[in-house]
Every structure is written in structure tokens, then in C-alpha cells.
Amino acid sequence: MCKVTTYFANDKKKRSFFTEIVYRVNETVVFSVSFLMNTFLS
């Protein structure tokens, strides 16, 4: 685990780019799911 953490800490550009994508996808999925739930339940 430590080696992986060090690798990512050293490569901040790649890490921030990757986490940015992950967060965006997560937000989109959560938003879509909640939107669909609201639409079907109401």
C-alpha cells in the first residue's frame, strides 16, 4: 500500500486528473439516480 501511495503522491497531475474524473462520474451517477427515483416515485 505504501508504495502505491508514494507513487500517486509523486505523480500529482495524474492523481488529480484521475480523481477529478472519478468525482465527476460519481456526481453524475448519483444525480441521475436520484432524479430518476424522484420522477418515478412522485
Image (cartoon, helix red, strand yellow):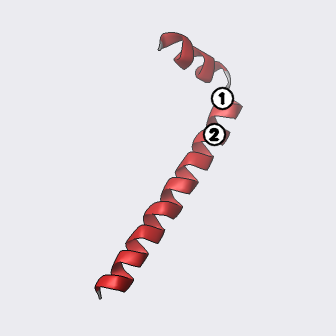
| CA neighbours of label 1 inside 10 A, class few (<14), some (14 to 19), many (20+) | few
In primary-sequence order, the first of circles 2 and 1 is 1
**Residue type at mark 1?**
Lys
Residue 37 on image: x %, y %:
35, 76
Vertical placement of 29 versus 41: above or below?
Answer: above
Q: State the SS at label 1.
A: helix
x then y, percent, for residue 1: 47, 14
Horizontal side of residue 21 vs 40, given as left or right: right
- Residue annotated with mark 1: 12
Element class at badge 2? helix
Residue 13 placement: quadrant: top right
In this view, the residue in front, 11 or 28, is 28
Q: Is residue 1 left or right of residue 4?
A: left
Query: Which residue is at a point 49% across and 61% down the rendered structure image?
Result: 29
Left or right, 3 with reference to 41: right
* In the displayed structure image, the side of residue 11 where residue 34 appears, left or right: left
- Residue found 62% across the figure and 48% down from its top: 21
What crowding class fits label 2: few (fewer than 14 Cα within 10 Å), some (14-19), or many (20 or more)? few
**Place of residue 41 in the rendered image (x, y in percent of width and height, measured from the top left):** 29, 83
The residue beneath circle 2 is: 18
Across and down, in percent, residue 8 comes to: 60, 23
Is residue 5 positioned above or below 34 on the image?
above
Q: Nearer the viewer, residue 29 or 5?
A: 29
Q: Which mark is residue 35?
A: none
- Residue in the picture at 56% in, 47% down: 22
| Contact flag, marks 2 and 1 (Cβ < 8 Å) | no
Question: Which residue is more in the foreground, 3 or 33?
Answer: 33
Which tag is nearer the camera, tag 2 or tag 1?
Answer: 2
Q: Residue furthest left?
A: 41
Question: Relative to 1, does residue 23 appear above or below in the rendering?
Answer: below
Query: Which residue extends farthest bottom?
Result: 42
